[in-house]
Amino acid sequence: MLEMITETQDQPIALSIENASRLSSLSKPFLRLEINRGKLRVVRPGNSRRVLIMMTDFMNYLNEGETNEQK
């Protein structure tokens, strides 16, 4: 899956839960569950209710999943 997500100059620095879901094929409810479990970090800009996932945190999260499967 990570081969499909490559770093480019057009790559956003943060993703909404919807965009992260679309990009990774993980469901929005599953991503929210992982956020609530503390396994996926998010930021809330300013006093906003909006939740953003930094691309670096998302890539680290996906890489950790790959590492755990290989064990």
Image (spheres, helix red, strand yellow):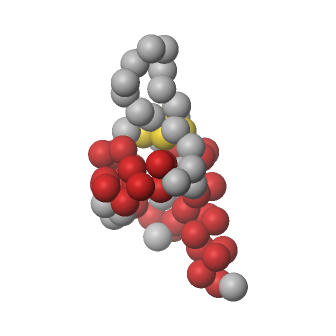
Direction from residue 41 to residue 47 in the image, left or right: left
At a point 61% along the width and 64% down the height, the residue shown is 63
Q: Quadrant of residue 18?
A: top left
Furthest residue in direction top, as rendered = 47
Residue 11, how many percent across, how many down? 47, 41
The answer to whether residue 26 shows anywhere in this view is: yes
**Residue closer to the observer: 16 or 38:** 38
**Which of the 4 image quadrants contains residue 25?**
bottom left
Q: Residue placed farthest to the right in the image? A: 71
Q: In this rendering, would 27 be left or right of 36?
A: left
Q: How many marks?
A: 0
Quadrant location of the C terminus in the rendered image: bottom right
Q: From what the image shows, is residue 8 above or below residue 63?
A: above
- The x, y position of residue 58, in whole percent, is 54, 50
Q: Which residue is drawn at the image coordinates 52% and 38% (left, top)?
A: 42
Q: Position of residue 70 (x, y in %)?
A: 65, 84
In the image shown, does 13 or 40 lie closer to the viewer? 40
Position above or below: 16 against 45: below
In depth, the one of 47 and 17 nearer the eye is: 47
Q: Is residue 12 visible?
A: no
